Structures are given as C-alpha cells and as structure tokens.
Amino acid sequence: MKTVFLSYSSHDYFFAEMLALKLGEAGFQLWRDQGAIRAGDDWRQTIEEGIRDSLAVIVALSTNSAESAYVTYEWAYATGMGKPVVPVKLSECRVHPKLEPTQYIDFSYPRALPWEALIDRLNQVDVEVDADTDSGPAKGRTRSDTTTLDVAANEILDYLNTRGFTMASFERLRQKLGSHLTDDVFQALIESEPARFRRATIKGGKPGIAKRVP
C-alpha cells in the first residue's frame, strides 16, 4: 500500500481523520505525526524518513498551519527531495510565496469537498512515479532525480551567494540546508553541472563543493 504524508496543524485534526478514511478506501495509507513519533524519537529524522518513504506530501493549508514552522519545514524538505507536493486549502489563509504557484485543491466549502479530485491527483502521481521508475535504467536519471538535483543546486548557490562564499564543505551545507544533501547528491551535482560546480577541499581536508566564478 502506497503511503501519503500529511503536513498539517494538529488543530485541523478532523480533516486528518477524514483524510485517513478516504485514502484508506482508495488504497493509500496516511502518514502523520499523530502516534507516529514516539517518546525518545528524533522528531526531525522521523519526519524526514516519513517524507522519503511517501509517494507524495499533502499540505493542509489553513490559518493554523500557516503559522506552523513544522509544517513549513515538512513541505520545504519534501520539495528539496523532489517529492510531489499537493496543497489542500482548508480555509482562507496566508500561503507561503514558494507554495503560491502550486495549484491547490479547495476544501474550504464543507458542502462540496472534492475528495474525488484529491484521489485522482494521487493516482496520477502514482502513475507518474511508476513511469519514471520504469524508464530510469534506459534514461539513466529519472525526472525525480533531476528535480532533486536542480533544487539542491539552487539551494547551494543561494546559500553561497547570501554568505559571500565561493565554497563550503559538504558537512556545513548539510548542517545549514538539510540532511537530504548526501555525499551522493554532491557528487552528482559536480558531475552533472561542471559549468557551475567543482570539487573543493576545505581546511582540514574536508570534502566540499565550490561554485565556478565567471
């Protein structure tokens, strides 16, 4: 059974409960932090693993979630991973600028909840992911991989430019930008973007990445 991650505010509990029922009927399993994070767990690692193992991430947009740093972290991490993000609007609220271009599914009218449209979208994502997986060996790198590298490249360049750096160690970039920047991602970036990046050795012999200065 494919898993779908829900990023939401606990104040929107009733929507989460109904979503779990509707997804279950459609053959999907819902991942949410209600009961999924146990005492003593590293919450960030648990959340990241939940997102990595999910087919897609549903973001419940509401006045409650708009103020939640946790919700922002979850969908931002999903975007960095190249995971499909499906915004669901529960009420009028402020939408983060990076989410605004993404078409949402409107659940703000109680008498006309578009459950069918949401399930159709998830089924579409499922087909797209399967197609990418099937074509992966023939094409070398899947669309999801390419998206992840593009996002990672922009994150790294933004960080270096903001700080005025020309290079940084893998370790520092992971600390500042997230654990999704694995050594494999850095190596793939250097190989696929030779015009923008090169290998670098930071003080102490630490491996790093440098932007090419025109």
Image (cartoon, helix red, strand yellow):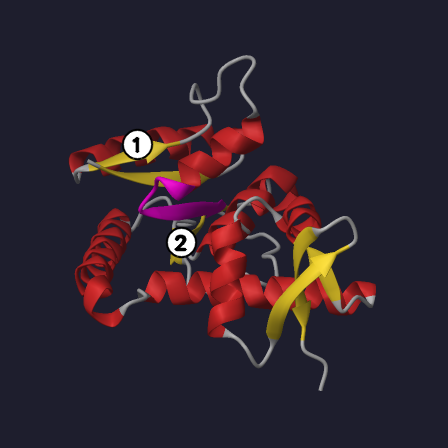
User: Can you see residue 100?
Assistant: no
Q: Are marks 2 and 1 in contact (CB under 8 Å)?
A: no
Q: Amino acid at mark 1?
A: Ala
Determine whether the residue tagged by mark 1 lies in a helix, strand or loop. helix
Residue 159 shown left or right of residue 124 in the figure: right
Of the pair 57 and 208, the residue shown nearer to us: 208
Report if residue 138 lies within the magenta region. no
Numbered range of the magenta stretch: 52-60
Residue positioned most to the top: 39
Residue 114 spot, x, y in % from top left: 29, 51
Of the pair 116 and 195, the residue shown nearer to us: 195
Q: Residues within 10 Å of mark 2 (few under 14, many from 20)?
A: many
Report the residue marked by disc 2: 83
Determine whether the residue tagged by mark 2 lies in a helix, strand or loop. loop
Residue 105 shown left or right of residue 191 in the figure: left
Report the disc number at residue 184: none
User: Can you see residue 111?
Assistant: yes
Report the residue marked by disc 1: 20
Residue 136 shown left or right of residue 94 in the figure: left
Above or below, 91 against 161 in this view is above
Give the residue displayed 72% in from the left and 51% down from the top.
205
User: Which is more foreground, mark 2 or mark 1?
Assistant: 2
